[in-house]
Amino acid sequence: MKIGTPKETFAGERRVAMTPDSATALQKLGHTCVIETGAGLEAGFDDAAYTAAGVEVVKTAAALWKAADVLAKVRVPDATEMKRLREGQTLISFFSPVADEKKMKSAATKGATVVAMEMIPRISRAQKMDALSSMANIAGYRAVIEAGNNFGRFFTGQITAAGKVPPAKVLVVGAGVAGLAAIGTSTSLGAITLAFDVRPEVAEQVESMGAEFVYLDFEEEQTDGAATGGYASVSSPEFREAQLAKFRELAPEVDIVITTALIPNREAPELWTEDMVAAMKPGSVIVDLAAEKGGNCKLTVMDEKVVTENGVTIIGYTDFPSRMASQASSLYSTNIRHLMTDLTPEKDGEINHNMEDDVIRGATIAHATAVTFPPPPPKVAAIAAAPKKEAAKELTPEEKRAAETAAFKQQTKTQVGLLAIGGALLLAVGLVAPASFMQHFIVFVLAVFVGFQVIWGVAHSLHTPLMAVTNAISSIIILGALVQIGSGSFLVILLAALAVFMTGINIFGGFLVTRRMLAMFQKS
């Protein structure tokens, strides 16, 4: 099959759906590649690089659409491109089936197959094809860079001869892929980072990245994000009011707000209201990553940067991935390459559009002259977090005392029973064994008993240092070996020397390990 990538016609779009590296990988699957001249120029890939990778370069878009069996694009095709789409062709691109319903129906009527990259199911097997996550990762990173570009201070705090600079305080609303990328960038730049999300399971992820999770004084059962395809669910009105109240409390304190809250096929929820903007300090910055769907901030203007009367900058750009075109193109083309790997299971250059495959079926919105949107739920559901266990009932002081008494009695009964059995066994052995044997045997049994009591009650985390010391101390056996090393028997001398060597390792090794472990807890 011939895979073609045209130059993007959307104004300001600098990404390209095929790079020289991805073209090389596609050719290993048995396909041939063709690209329109200048398609990768703004992403940093010139025609010479494609030619060197074995890609055919054609002069016009019309020639490319005519030659290619599979079209790989970034943006939704425009009206001209839809006219060029023909029966039997496969189109792979971002293609919103809700907003572009007419185009979807038109493609189905023509008999073309359309694979929408934003419809890739969010399951483990499909992560390598998840273009939304790839682009959201770049958008989250770039949002912090744009905020820093418009913020008048350092992110990190500094104490210099010229004065003290306090660290910036950044609030990230929404801890999805874009939010976590923004959190990672913000903390790495030294800012005090706060993060909020309606999904409680992301709190640990946020805190592991060095940020502080913002909790609400409000109890509500939230649907696990894994059970909803990785997205947040719609909250109740009461939860929303508690959320907005918390944001109003934080608004005067934070310097930068990055909002990423967006639910697929819905308008962006309004989370940062006009009064919150008014409460922010002059020079503060808001970056609204949901601007394309109406914005999380009331005052966001799509694709523009505005400054409010109180000096707050609100950035509503929708082309953050395109502002890092080379990186975005590399990631997006890799997503498409992985999708083509699934579509070409035999690596023979022939596409097998298996509609029984969860990933392929989920992303396909038009196939075999039929509209196949919306897809059925995947057969393999995402693994949701385990339900919370009920908290253990808190015991009263009387109940605690009764439980401790019962446990003590049980332990005493067990120990007395074991001692009685051990004593009976010793007595039975003593009736038949000679006295010289019994002296050594009793010492051996007592040593085993003492060693058991020493080790059994120690926490697992202390076993290694404890064993190291006990190894060193227990190597008192070296004294017996030294006494026997002067024996007249060659075999006894050999065994004694071996015992000295092994116990020497035990002694010095034990103290060396203990010293190393103690050094781990020393500051210097």
Image (cartoon, grey):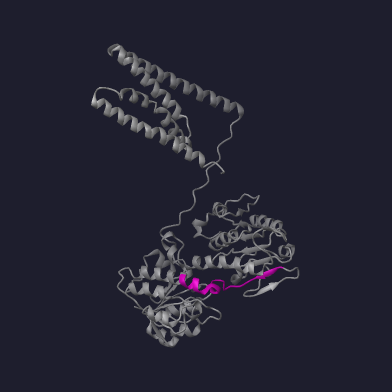
Furthest-right residue in view? 309
Is 394 part of what is drawn in magenta? no
Q: Is residue 102 left or right of residue 351?
A: right
Q: Can residue 103 be seen here?
A: yes
Question: Which of the 4 image quadrants contains residue 484?
Answer: top left
Q: Position of residue 464 (x, y in %)?
A: 44, 37
- When the figure is inspected, residue 348 is found, relative to residue 434, above or below; the finding is below
Query: Which residue corresponds to the image point at 30% horizontal and 23% vertical from the top-left?
Result: 486
- Dividing the picture into quadrants, the one containing residue 316 is bottom right
- Of the pair 271 and 426, the residue shown nearer to us: 426
Image height check: is 448 above or below 51? Answer: above
Residue that appears at 48% across and 34% down:
459
Q: 259 or 364, which lies in front?
A: 259
- As drawn, the residue found furthest toward the left would be 490
Q: Nearer the viewer, residue 191 or 427?
A: 191
Give the x, y percent position of residue 496. Answer: 30, 27
For the N terminus, which image quadrant? Answer: bottom left
- Residue 207 point in image, percent of width and height: 57, 52
